[in-house]
Image (spheres, rainbow, N blue to C red):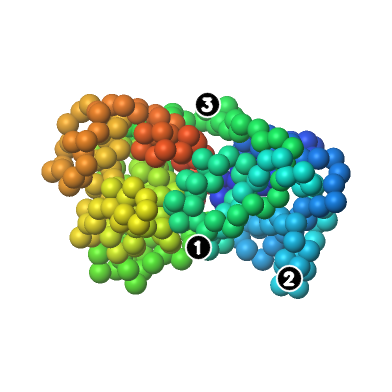
Amino acid sequence: MYRLYNKHTGEHFYTADAAERDNLVEVGWDNEGEGWVAPKRSSTPVYRLYNSYVAGGNHHYTTDAKEKAACIAAGWTDEGIGWYSDDAHTASIYREYNPNAKTGTHNYTGDKDEHDWVVALGWRDEGVAWYALEVKELKVNVSNAADRTSHAIMGTSLATAQQMAAYYKWVGYAFPSSTYASKGAANIEQFAQIAYEEATAEGVRAEVVFCQMMWETGWLQFGGDVLPEQCNFGGLGATGNGVRGNSFPDVRTGIRAQVQHLKAYASTEPLNNACVDSRFGYVTRGRATTIEGLSGTWAADKMYGTRIYNMVQGLLEFGG
């Protein structure tokens, strides 16, 4: 079973068809490799459905005939049987749900570490979706993107504030103005401008800061341990199990703290602004100079940096 990722919408797509995989890669999807091995036939089909009514479209997969019927009744397109579940229940494929997302609302994985990490972020654990003969180790393919821009965290920004704001709107999320208008950002344009200014002040690439914020907060919809009003856009100090982490008085201070924390990871140069990151001194300076280097350091997820890198590529390719 092949797993692909659309960095523009955040949707993961799963298919047993190599030709379908190749067609999607040609139009810009990232090939994340083989997720698992499905039986050629069993008594338990996995149904594939498609929702064309959300921006970018969205797929859903289920073994539950009643859930399939409910989706069809709600307007989803029945795309038939995608593959089959292993009746012997050899290896579990887990299902998680993000109630704040419009596309990519569900994630399916045989990697228990990935499952636990997504749930820790605030996704709902929906248990085992189906079973596989074997779980494969995903190998995210970023080779096509490697020659388009640097993997470095530090450097000159390649995206403008206007591009970041336009990308946010294109993805389709509503900016939480009711929360942030009194904290210095009444709209996504002001939010992106602050991010650009704070990143530039410390020599951090603005698109890296922006995409990390979008990943950490679910496009500013939150839903995990950190509350929107904390203005903590990087999950600073939020270690799971209900720990809220740091709080900041306004949007600019929250973004400044995240920028400074990124600089601590990526550089040994001193800060240009007064330090507002209370965790700055806990970081071994220069331990992660690339976006991928954030995997297993900033976050335990071994694919954390790659996911952010893919989002950065989506932003830069979108252009605005």
* 178 relative to 3, above or below: below
Count of labels in the image: 3
Q: Residues within 10 Å of mark 3 (few under 14, many from 20)?
A: few
Residue 70: mark: 2
Three-letter code for the amino acid on which mark 1 is drawn: Asn
Q: Nearer the viewer, mark 1 or mark 3?
A: 1
In the shown orientation, is residue 77 left or right of residue 273? right
Quarter of the image that includes the N terminus: top right
Secondary structure found at label 2: helix
Distance in Å between CA atoms under marks 1 and 3: 33 Å
Distance in Å between CA atoms under marks 2 and 3: 44 Å
Residue 122 in picture, x, y percent from top left: 45, 56
The disc, 2 or 3, on the residue closer to the chain's N-terminal end is 2
Residue 147: mark: 3
Q: Residue furthest left?
A: 274
Q: Nearer the viewer, residue 146 or 94?
A: 94
Residue 54: mark: none
Three-letter code for the amino acid on which mark 2 is drawn: Ala
Q: Quadrant of residue 176?
A: bottom left
> Which residue is located at x 78 percent, y 64 percent?
65
Q: Nearer the viewer, residue 287 or 128?
A: 128
Distance in Å between CA atoms under marks 2 and 1: 20 Å
> Which residue is located at x 57 percent, y 27 percent?
143
